[in-house]
Amino acid sequence: MARIVFRRSRLQGQSAPVGMAASPWSDTLAAGGASSLAVATTAACRAIQQGDAGWRPINAVSHILWGPDAAAQRQFTMRYTAAGLLLNLIACGFWAWVYCFRRRPHRSSLFLSAARAFVTSVIAYLTDYHLVPRRFTPGFELCLSRRSFPWIYGALAIGLVLPEALTFMRRNTGPHLKAIKGGPHGHNQAAGRRAPQH
């Protein structure tokens, strides 16, 4: 997961946050894993809501390897389900890389990150269903209605921004929690230490 990195500024002589992540690759892995889980879970939930098996849209992703028969599989199998999960992870990992590409953490904000995730999900949809050959589509269209697509690509956007949002919350709530734990007692102790001795 992403973490906050601080370093001391030699020019200004004070500490300042200069980034939200240890490395771009750790951000990409976190965003890819979160978005893959969000997309798979949302697709399964949408299938159940339609009265179908939750494993079916996951299996349908493996049509890239096994052909359209994959979308007819309603049970968990290593052949179809494992392949579908892996392909979904690879695809979401690619979109996570697009999301993190040339990002500048020290200039970023949660609003800009959410906007970037939304734009990435729109590009993903256009690529999946208007640019790539039918054999390389996600496969959700083989068993889910088109009404499920906003949910699935919305889940992709949420998964992409989720690790960064958690880091943002931890960065902003951490100092407040320390201040609350210190309380007036800690303030009085600090004041006592500064009191002059007679």
Image (cartoon, rainbow, N blue to C red):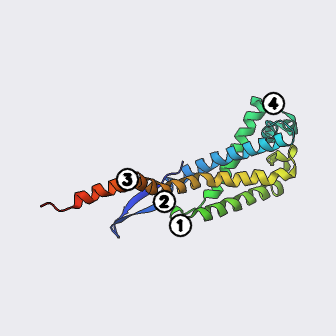
Q: Which residue is mark 3?
A: 182
Q: Which residue is mark 2?
A: 19
Q: How far apart are the two marked residues, 4 and 3, measured between alpha carbons?
A: 54 Å
Q: Earlier in the sequence, mark 4 or mark 3?
A: 4
Q: Is residue 174 left or right of residue 163?
A: left
For label 4, count other residues whose C-alpha is less than 10 Å away and answer few (under 14), some (14-19) or many (20+): some
Q: Which residue is mark 4?
A: 75
SS of the residue under disc 2: strand
Q: Is residue 168 left or right of residue 86?
A: left
Residue plotted at (72% across, 34% down): 82
Disc 4 residue type? Gln
Disc 2 residue type? Gly
Q: Nearer the viewer, mark 4 or mark 3?
A: 3
Disc 3 residue type? Gly
Q: Which residue is mark 1?
A: 107
| Whole-percent x, y for residue 155 in the image | 72, 51
Residue plotted at (53% across, 61% down): 105
Tell me the quarter of the image containing the C terminus.
bottom left
